[in-house]
Amino acid sequence: MPEPFPEQCPACASKGWVLCNTGNDKSPRYEIQRCDACEAFDGDQAALTVVVNAAQAQPQLLGFVQNVSLLTHEGEEGLDGNPFETTSEDYIATLNQLILEARKLLGTAEKCGDCGETVPYLIGCPDGIEICRQCFDAGQH
């Protein structure tokens, strides 16, 4: 067994596992493997079990990650066989939705003081109330 690291394993940040691309650039294949530097787990299967159990303990987070993984990456082959391209407005809308979902999961999303909608951020008004962009643009407060 290797000597323990004084503070944190530099290879895995003391998680005990690493995500490895066992494929190639054209056809990547990612696997969870135990960290060979700190050997926190007996093998790859033990490391994978820890990651799976952690994911299953957080179903909302797992759902969020699954939704993100279903997005088509720029340049990835689209349904028509051509490289996927989208307008910047579509990317911005998708990113804004992901930010809102992430903030809801983390409990940092805000609630509009006017309409009660859960939003990623609020705008402070001179009268002290904090409202969402939609209410602000509609001339509320």
Image (cartoon, grey):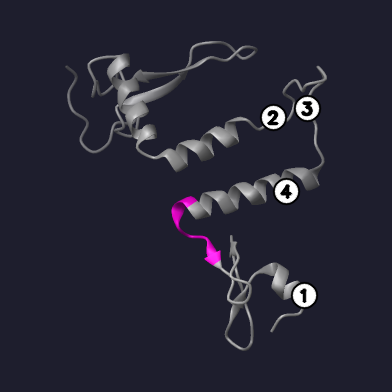
Q: Amino acid at mark 4?
A: Ile
Q: Amino acid at mark 1?
A: Ala
Numbered mark located on residue 72 in the image:
2
Label 1 near label 2: C-beta < 8 Å?
no
Numbered mark located on residue 92 in the image:
4
Label 3 near label 4: C-beta < 8 Å?
no
Instruction: Specify few, some or many for label 1: CA neighbours under 10 Å numbering under 14, 14-19, or 20 or more.
Output: few
Numbered mark located on residue 84 in the image:
3
| SS under mark 2 | loop
Question: Could you say which is closer to the camera, residue 87 or residue 26?
Answer: 87
| SS under mark 1 | loop
Instruction: Specify few, some or many for label 4: CA neighbours under 10 Å numbering under 14, 14-19, or 20 or more.
Output: few
N-terminal-most mark, 4 or 1: 4
Q: Amino acid at mark 2?
A: Thr
**Residue 93 in the image: x percent, y percent?**
72, 49
Numbered mark located on residue 121 in the image:
none
129 relative position to 14: left or right: right
| SS under mark 3 | loop
Q: Amino acid at mark 3?
A: Phe
Residue 48 lies in the magenta stretch: no
Label 2 near label 3: C-beta < 8 Å?
yes
The residue that appears at 34% across and 34% down in the rendered structure is 54
